[in-house]
Structures are given as C-alpha cells and as structure tokens.
Image (cartoon, grey):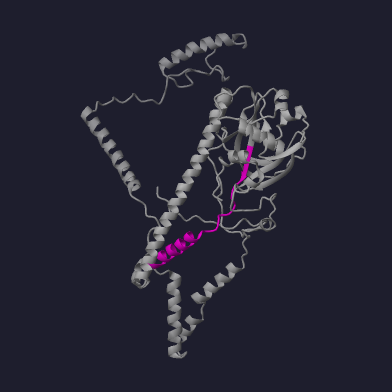
Amino acid sequence: MRLTWCSRRLLLGGFQFSCRTLSQAARAEPAPPAGQAGPWHLYTAVCLQRLPVVAPPLSDTERRFAALLRQLEFERSLKSSHEIRHEMDIATAEALRASEGDDPDLAEAASLQTAADFEDACAEELAGFEPAPTITEADRAGDQRSLQRRLSSRLVLVVQQRLGAGTSWMLPQGRHQDGATLRQTAEQTLQAMVGPNVNAQFLGNAPWGFYKYKYPKPLQQESGAVGGKVFFYKAVLRGGSVEPVADRVADHRWLTAAELGGQLRSRYRRAVHRLLIDHD
Amino acid sequence: MALSLGLSTVQRLAANVLDMSLSRSLCALTISTRRDISTSSAAAIAVSHPLCAEPLKKKKRIDPAVVRAREERRRRKLEKAIRRLEKSSRQLKPLAEMELPREVRAELSERRRPARPLTTEEANERFDLMKEWTRHRREQHVADVAVLRRIQESRAKALRELRAESFELYCAAIEEDPDLVPWAHSGPTLTPPIDGYDAPDGDYVDTTRRWE
C-alpha cells in the first residue's frame, strides 16, 4: 500500500505507524547501543489515567476471612447497651404475661418502643437509601468512550491520532521542540489533543517509559532523522472534561490495562504496559 | 514681680537678671522702661529650680550572700513550677475510645457473653482459613513488589535513554517537582458518588477533651 506523506505535518505531529515498516524496524533493530547513528526525533506521549472510583469486590478468600474476623470480634466483645435493652424488653414481656396484665408499671414499660422496634425502624430507614450502582449503564452497553465504565479499575486514554494521511491508535503523542523541557512538551501535547479544559496532574518531571521506532526509508531521507524516540509521561485525571480535538484526533477510548492489547500494536503495547499498574 | 511671686532671695536674684534681659528685649516693643511689676504674662516668666523633690535615699549595701540566696530561691520556685507543669504533660492522657465507659464497667458481669466452646471441626476450619489468608496476602505482596519493580525499571530505562540523547533534558527531568508532594487523593469507596445528591444538613460538635 503506497502511502502519501505530508512531510511538514509529519515532522511536526508524528509519523504513521505501518504494520510492514514497524515489523521491519523491529527485526532490523538490534539492542540499542549508547548512541545509534543519525539524529532521532524526540516525542512525548501522555498516559492519562482515571483512577478507580470504587473498591473491587472481595474475592472468595477475602469474604470468608472477613466473616471470620467479624465472628471473632463478636465472640470477644461485651454486650452492647442495645442488646441489654433487648434482653430487658423480653424479660418485661415475660413478666407481663406471667402477671396477666395486673401490674401497671410493667404494662407501661412494655408499651414503650422496644429495642426490636428501634432496630426495625433503623433497617427501614436504611432500606430507603438507594446507593449508586457499581456496574453502570456504560458497563452494560460496553461504551468504551465513557468514563463511567469499570469503576473499580484504572482507565487509560488511547486516541486514534491523525498522522499524515492515516490514523493510528496510540497514547496522545507530540513532537518535542527545542526550548521546552519534556514535561512541558507533554503538558502541551495533552492540551493540544484533548482540549484545554482537562484537569490532569502530571506525576513528576521524569519520563516513566521509553519506546523507539524507525521511520520508513522515504521519511528518513525527507526528515533527516533515523526515527523517533518516545518518552511516556504519566498523568492522573483530576477533573475537567476530555474534548478530543477533531483535527488531531479521530477517536478516543478509555481502556483498562488488559484491554490495551486489543487496541495497540504489540511492541508499543509492551512498552506502555511496562509502566502501568495492572492488578485489574 | 519677683517679690510678688514669693520667691527666695537666690531665686529672686536670678529672676531679676532674667527680668532685666527680658525687659531689655521687650524694650523695642514696649514704651516704658524697666519695671518690676508687669501685667503681661511674657514678662512674668521665671526659671525656677526643681521643686517638690526630696534628696535621694542612700542605697544600702546588701550582703552578696543574701542576694544570691534570694536569686536561688526565685530560681527554685520557677523550676518547681516548670516541673509541675511538665509532670502534667508527661502523664499519658486517657483515650476515651480505648477505655470502657463508667456505666459499662459497673455492670461488667451482666455484659459478659456466655463462653461457647469451639468444636474440633470449627477450630480446624478457622486454622485452615487463617493459613489460606496468609498465603493469599503473601501472593498479593509478591505480585505488588513485581509490579513496582517493573515500573521502576521502565523509569530507569527511560532516564538512561534520555541521558544518552540529551544531557540538558535529562537534568530538567531529574528536577524535583514541588507540586507533587503533598499528594492528596480520596481513595475508592464502596459505592460510587450519586449525581446531584443533596446531603442532609447537620452540625458537627467536637467534644474531644483537650489536655494542656
């Protein structure tokens, strides 16, 4: 498949991943020595994460051990005032039955709200409260563009970035220019890709991951660089809204670490996976 | 004028001198020459010696030993006061949550639960479950350590490559980020927040006992 290049766009914005050229690059590339021949273009990519909103459900062991701990705590405890009151209510009721309603004091004591009544009233009030569901609409619909999906996992933003004539699924990536640090480049890249209203907190000045790829031959000659070196920066979504900019990004998804495999290319995915927490 | 003020002889002399000089200076303004009685207040000004003062008392010499004894006593009093205050701060304050309330302590016998002995099967089950839990937690810890090591290595590799690429960018990357610490995050809850939930109003009155 012949690809047409818009060299200016590519040099500023990135380059197009092509299956054929990537695999060629992977085979041709040896273990990276200290300084490979030829200049490399530097890129920063941003791994924007939405942290878990809800705790994951307990596993079987955890559930049984939690029950055991509750049981032990109960056995070693003293009776609470509520329990004492409940026992006294029962005794009062018994005494009332034995005396067959002669004693007015007992009758009065029995007519007050018993501990059991109080417990029932509390349970009723609790039943009236409806907590938000942990499995949301987005989960059922499988809407991968929604932030309300998979509330107990971390979600990573993956975009279909426009490169040259085509697009590619990757983390938002931007070319580093002279005069800025890598962290500044990363922040600018994120704002350029998903709009200025995103509230992301970047985790430090240092990159978290590294990925290197070679340009295809025509682009190498055009740009004068061997390929690109991508430095990954991590950020946490604190709020705001993610509004993908249409002329840089065709589509976006929020994926868990496990779902990344289905969306990203293998060597790139391995580089990204190395810097992620993947419990979930 | 000086006579009329009822001054002493010495004072009167001084007053006269001043009167003369004042009169001379006022000559240009007044028609009459020197006079002793004046109705204007300017000519009646007189400089007097300090009045209503006692000669100062003679300072008695105090025995230095007595002075030292007084200082010592003052110091010991202060130290005693400091020790008394510190003693109070050294005493461990009671934790209301860790102590049984007075009412409960009074009826301890009624509050005890009847001891129910465990059967052998139950005891074995509990023992097995505790072992299973230990193994489960150890596996979790090992997995956590592996994940953290993997992430650390990825970071170290990125910094190595950056250093090889550009020393300047590397130096900027290893700078401390002051916004990172202190890090604050409200962790995951059991259920997600309800959209537009109107929490009921209430007052929080802090009844913690404070010890100074």
Q: Is residue A211 left or right of residue B8?
A: right
Image coordinates for residue B114, horizontal then vertical, percent: 35, 73
In the figure, residue B121 lies in which quadrant? Answer: bottom left
Image coordinates for residue B84, horizontal then vertical, percent: 31, 45
Residue A47 falls inside the magenta stretch:
yes
In the figure, residue A49 lies in which quadrant? Answer: top right
* Front-lying residue, A26 or B45: A26
Residue visible at 72% across and 31% down? A13
Image coordinates for residue A99, horizontal then vertical, percent: 43, 90
Residue visible at 60% across and 30% down? A29
Q: Is residue B179 left or right of residue A17?
A: left
Q: Is residue B11 left or right of residue A38?
A: left
Residue visible at 69% across and 46% down? A253
Q: Examine the rendering and report whether any part of residue B3 can be seen.
A: yes
Residue visible at 44% across and 15% down? B12
Q: How many marks?
A: 0
* Front-lying residue, B197 or A154: A154
Above or below — where is B61 with respect to A82?
above
Q: Examine the rendering and report whether any part of residue B174 can be seen.
A: no
* Front-lying residue, B60 or B34: B60
Residue B71 falls inside the magenta stretch:
no
Image quarter where the N terminus of chain A lies is top right
Above or below — where is A85 with respect to A246?
below
- Residue range of the region highlighted in magenta in the rendering: A46-75
Image coordinates for residue B129, horizontal then vertical, percent: 41, 62
* Front-lying residue, A178 or A121: A178
